[in-house]
Amino acid sequence: MQRKFSLLNSMLISCITEDGQAHSQQINSLLSLSEFLGSYTVTNYNLKINQVNYDVVKTGKCGKQEYPKIALQRNGYILPTELTLTQSSDLEYFINEHVGNIYRLEIDSSVYQMSR
């Protein structure tokens, strides 16, 4: 009997603070992603999902939301294709189904641009 292993365990976020301290954390839930993003006063993060690196840059604020959202961005426009994220595997699913180089991630009350 073969087992399927979830690749989700390979989600890692990291950042370097102004004082040069490096921080990283394995991400296994949207809550842990949200907590990491809120823990450090930086605007640039690195998010690795299944061995693919994404630069995550805080670009602004949005209204407080119950659930995070992700959308595909092309030529400076947010496409109507978006997904409300209820679990961290939704993030992986969206990126695999909607291949692109730039995404818009709204989590808590912040907006981030994710790019390859």
Image: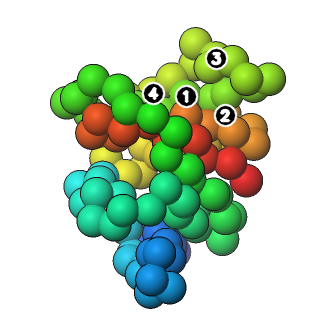
Work out how far the residue at label 1 is from the one at label 4, CA to CA, in angstroms: 7 Å
Residue that carries the numbered disc 2 in the rendered image: 98
Tell me, yes or no, whether the two marked residues, 1 and 4, touch with CB atoms within 8 Å: yes
**Relative horizontal placement of residue 22, taking residue 32 as reference (left or right):** right
Q: Earlier in the sequence, mark 1 or mark 4?
A: 1
Inter-mark Cα distance, 1 to 2: 9 Å
The earlier-in-sequence mark between 1 and 2 is: 1
The residue beneath circle 3 is 79
Q: Earlier in the sequence, mark 3 or mark 2?
A: 3
Amino acid type, mark 2? His
User: Compared with residue 50, is residue 83 higher up or lower down, i.e. above or below?
Assistant: above
Within 10 Å of the Cα at label 1, are there few (<14), some (14-19), or many (20+) other Cα atoms?
Answer: many
Relative to the observer, which residue lies in front, 12 or 40?
Answer: 40
Upstream in sequence: badge 2 or badge 4? 4
Dot in front, 4 or 3: 3
Please give the residue where the numbered disc 1 appears in the rendered image: 71
Q: Looking at the picture, how far across and down is residue 76, in whole percent?
A: 73, 23
Q: Position of residue 54 (x, y in %)?
A: 64, 58
Give the image location of residue 94, x and y in percent: 55, 38
Residue position for label 4: 83
Q: Secondary structure at mark 3?
A: strand
Q: Earlier in the sequence, mark 3 or mark 1?
A: 1
Q: Nearer the viewer, mark 1 or mark 4?
A: 1
Residue lying furthest bottom: 21
